[in-house]
Amino acid sequence: MMDSVQIRKYLPHRYPFLLIDRVVELVEGDYILAYKNITINEEVFQGHFPNYPVFPGVMLIEAMAQACGVLGFKTMDKTPDDGSIYLFAGIDNVRFKRQVIPGDRVFFNCKKISDKRGIWKFECVATVDDQLVTSATIMCADRSI
């Protein structure tokens, strides 16, 4: 289990773009289960949409990529402080099945399926109350900075 302080050791993101609140499970080299609590106080709801707040799908994808980043950094035993960054390299097979609204807790389950030449591939799903929200294949690249 990792709290937000521990997560910040593995991700360079900060408010308002740190989109993972807690890591519930992590098996290095295999999978991660993390979540984000969605509140009405999210800045994005000022414009998306003020009278019908829906958490943007692109931010769900980014949150999944951040979960993949934590898994990748932990697996490689690296942190951004080591001069490494984990970049979003691609996305395939994205599907959105349910809206995410204030009050939801979104779980991100990402499983590593391959890594070749510094490009890691993950199968990811996001769920709320055990209902599928989003699924995607995400690719990330480990690069020196």
Image (tube, rainbow, N blue to C red):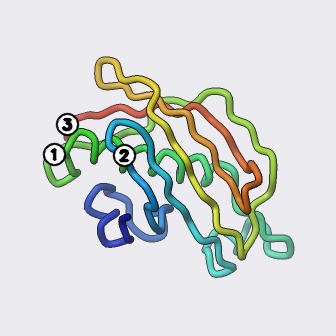
Q: Which residue was labeled with disc 1?
A: 83
Q: Which residue was labeled with disc 3?
A: 144
Badge 2: few (under 14), some or many (20 or more) residues near its Cα, within 10 Å? few
Q: Which residue was labeled with disc 2?
A: 27
Q: Type of residue at label 3?
A: Ser
Q: Residue at x 39, y 51 (%)?
A: 26
Asked if residue 144 lies left or right of residue 124, the reply is: left
Q: Position of residue 1 (x, y in %)?
A: 38, 64
Do the CB atoms of the residues marked 1 and 3 lie less than 8 Å apart? yes
The quarter of the picture where residue 4 lies is bottom left
Q: Position of residue 126 (x, y in %)?
A: 64, 50
Badge 1: few (under 14), some or many (20 or more) residues near its Cα, within 10 Å? few
> In this picture, is 112 found above or below 109?
above
> In this picture, is 114 found above or below 18?
above
Which secondary structure, mark 2?
strand
Q: Give the Cα distance between marks 3 and 2.
A: 24 Å
Q: From the viewer's perspective, is the residue at label 3 or at label 2 nearer? A: 2
Q: Give the Cα distance between marks 1 and 2.
A: 23 Å
Which secondary structure, mark 3?
strand
Do the CB atoms of the residues marked 3 and 2 lie less than 8 Å apart? no
Q: Where the C terminus falls, by quadrant?
A: top left
Earlier sequence position, callout 1 versus callout 3: 1
Q: Residue at x 81, y 52 (%)?
A: 98
> In this picture, is 2 found above or below 96?
below
Do the CB atoms of the residues marked 1 and 2 lie less than 8 Å apart? no
Asked if residue 71 lies left or right of residue 85, the reply is: right
Which secondary structure, mark 1?
loop
The quarter of the picture where residue 76 lies is top left
Earlier sequence position, callout 3 versus callout 2: 2
Q: Type of residue at label 2?
A: Val
Asked if residue 35 lies left or right of residue 130, the reply is: left
